[in-house]
Amino acid sequence: MLLETLPNEILAHIFTTLPTLDAVLALAATSTHFYRLYHGSQRLAILAAVLDKEFGPIDAILQICTHNASQPAHHHRQVAFSDALVEQVLSIGHTAKHWEDVYPFKRWKTNYAARRLLTDAERFTLRRAIYRLWLFTRAFHNPNHSRNTRNNPTILTDRAALLHNWSTPELAEMLDTHNILRDVVANNICPSNGKIRQKFSKRYPDSSLQQHSPHQPIFNIYANHPPPPSASWCATGGPGWMNSSIITSAKYTHARLQPSRWHDPGMEGWGDDINHYYVVEDMLKLDPQQLLFLRDRCTLKVQVEGFIKTRVEGGEGGWFANNGETFCETLWAVLKQRGVEVEAFKGTVEDGELGVAVV
């Protein structure tokens, strides 16, 4: 019996049971009948069902897409699915899928024997945590929330109200994911002077044995190196910046740890101890898509600084610097309101008893 002879209702159901959008498009391309069925009245319903399977939970993505300053972040929004939302869901969903590949390397960074791929259920849990952290970032890490307003009682209540939407185990999943984001920022995007020194010594062991070697990195321990006057290497363009390429001049095409006449590896350090801690706190206000972009595309410190100045601050009064992320302090407040001991909670997440991948 040919598939084309089945009723359209059954064929539409077959479309909705496919696991990925690529599979849907492939089936739609097999015949004129399937093509017309897919592009008919059931198209958005098919897309909603399939995107939920591949990138879900899709409702959590829609909360990000429909958030605006006119409505409290903790209010659940019901929206009709549309083509415009499909594009946003794909962009956010693909970002979460990339973090599925990053998570195992960071979660079991030192315990190599325990490293494994995530199960389908764990991938779903990780994506859900990514989306919820993304919503928190979009709602409270923006120019409307400057350093002077972070302790405002009204804003504190709004932040806590959003986290109160989720159970304590779900908050543990968010903290586990947040720790992964922190590790990426601290070690890949904004490495400390000590991390750069360690990587340089590992890359060039002979130079590390010579105290006065000309290839020893020189760190600026007083201030961060400013970006060059012209940030022509930074990502440019409209909303599709995530898929754009970075335009680099020959002066900035060297590797991070490669010493040259234009570049000293010590320039790549973001400070030691306290200074580095506050840099990481500031950078954690970026959303998961921006962090992924910086990790994969901005390999040099000047590129990261230029991204912040041109893409994040954007002339909004310097709200970004010296104004660390507020997720953790809000989470601690919510846990105390629920009678949960904060240090014990953090310990259970670090030990893998709670979180995305439970031991």
Image (cartoon, rainbow, N blue to C red):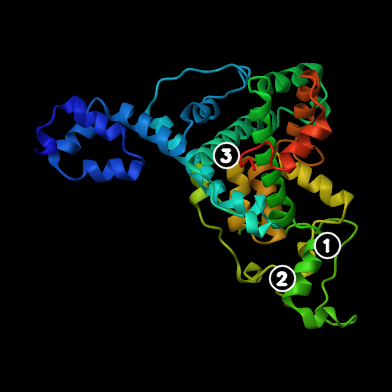
In the depicted structure, whether residue 346 falls above or below residue 190: above
Viewer-side label of 3, 2: 3
Mark 1 Cα-neighbour bin, 10 Å: few <14, some 14–19, many ≥20: some
Quarter assignment of residue 83: top left
Amino acid type at image mark 1: Gly
Relative image position of residue 144 (x, y in whole percent): 71, 27
The answer to whether residue 237 of the structure is visible from this angle is no
Q: Mark 3 vs mark 2: which is more N-terminal?
A: 3
Label drawn at residue 194: 1
The answer to whether residue 9 of the structure is visible from this angle is yes
Distance of label 2 from label 1 (alpha carbons): 13 Å
Mark 3 Cα-neighbour bin, 10 Å: few <14, some 14–19, many ≥20: many
- In the image, is 121 to the left or to the right of 49? right
Viewer-side label of 2, 1: 1
Amino acid type at image mark 3: Leu
Cβ atoms at labels 1 and 3 below 8 Å apart: no
Label drawn at residue 172: none
Residue matched to label 3 = 126
Front residue of 265/246: it is: 265
Q: Residue at x 68, y 25 (%)?
A: 168
**Disc 2 on helix, strand or loop?**
loop
Amino acid type at image mark 2: Leu
- In the image, is 103 to the left or to the right of 187? left
Quarter holding the C terminus is top right
Front residue of 75/1: it is: 1
Q: Residue at x 53, y 49 (%)?
A: 98
Q: Residue at x 80, y 37 (%)?
A: 323
**Disc 3 on helix, strand or loop?**
helix
